[in-house]
Amino acid sequence: MSIFSKIVSGEIHAHVVAETNDFMAFLDVNPLVMGHVLVIPKQEIDYIFEMDDELYAGLTLFAKIVAKAVKAAFPCKKVGVAVIGLEVPHTHIHLIPMNNVSDMNFSKEKLKPSQQELAAAATKIRAQF
């Protein structure tokens, strides 16, 4: 069971910003920038292109809705989208507020926000729905 499945089941706490029957969006605990959100299908599927078409399309549309809330909560030029999929064997889309290309550099040192800072960021994003 992946760490994301444990978040879906409630075994591990996450700062959830949006959720449907099939999808969940929550803050990355070690973000590249504040407002960095992970969007996942609740069903554990390792590789995004192994998802069936309906679930894939639904995940993409859900990510679009979440990205609009992220951009409103954390004003930026654009919300970047990345699918890497090597660090956790559960499909996930990174949504990252960006003003510069370097905001999407996954090799740079990640932030280490406190639980209070993450809670405040999640509240800020949830308020945009």
Image (cartoon, rainbow, N blue to C red):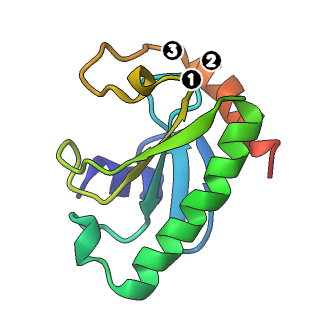
The amino acid on which the numbered mark 3 sits, given as a three-letter code, is Pro
Spatial distance from mark 2 to mark 3, Cα to Cα?
Answer: 6 Å
The residue that appears at 47% across and 77% down in the rendered structure is: 57
Q: Which callout, 1 or 3, points at the residue further toward the start of the chain?
A: 1
Badge 3, how many Cα within 10 Å: few under 14, some, many 20+?
some
Tell me, yes or no, if residue 31 can be seen here. Answer: no
Q: Position of residue 32 (x, y in %)?
A: 42, 23
Name the spot of residue 29 as percent of width and height, x first.
44, 28
Residue 71, labelled with which disc? none
Residue annotated with mark 2: 117
Task: Estimate the x, y position of residue 106 in percent, counting from the top left.
Answer: 29, 28
Mark 2, secondary structure of its residue: helix
| Tag nearer the camera, 1 or 2 | 1
Taking 114 as reference, is 65 above or below it?
A: below
Q: In which quarter of the image is the N terminus?
A: bottom left
- Density class for disc 1 (Cα within 10 Å; few <14, some 14-19, many ≥20) is many
Residue 2 visible at all: yes
Amino acid of disc 2? Glu
Q: Name the residue under label 1.
A: 34
Disc 1 marks a residue whose amino acid type is Met
Cβ atoms under marks 1 and 2 closer than 8 Å: yes
- Residue visible at 43% across and 66% down in the picture: 41
Answer yes or no: do the residues labelled 1 and 3 have beta carbons within 8 Å? yes
User: Gap between marks 1 and 2, in whole Å?
Assistant: 9 Å
What residue is at 52 percent from the left and 76 percent from the top? 58
Residue 113 image label? 3
Q: Nearer the viewer, mark 1 or mark 3?
A: 1
Judge the density around disc 2: few (<14), some (14-19), many (≥20) Cα neighbours within 10 Å.
few
Front residue (pair 72, 87): 72
Say which element carries label 1.
loop
Residue 94: x and y in percent read 42, 45
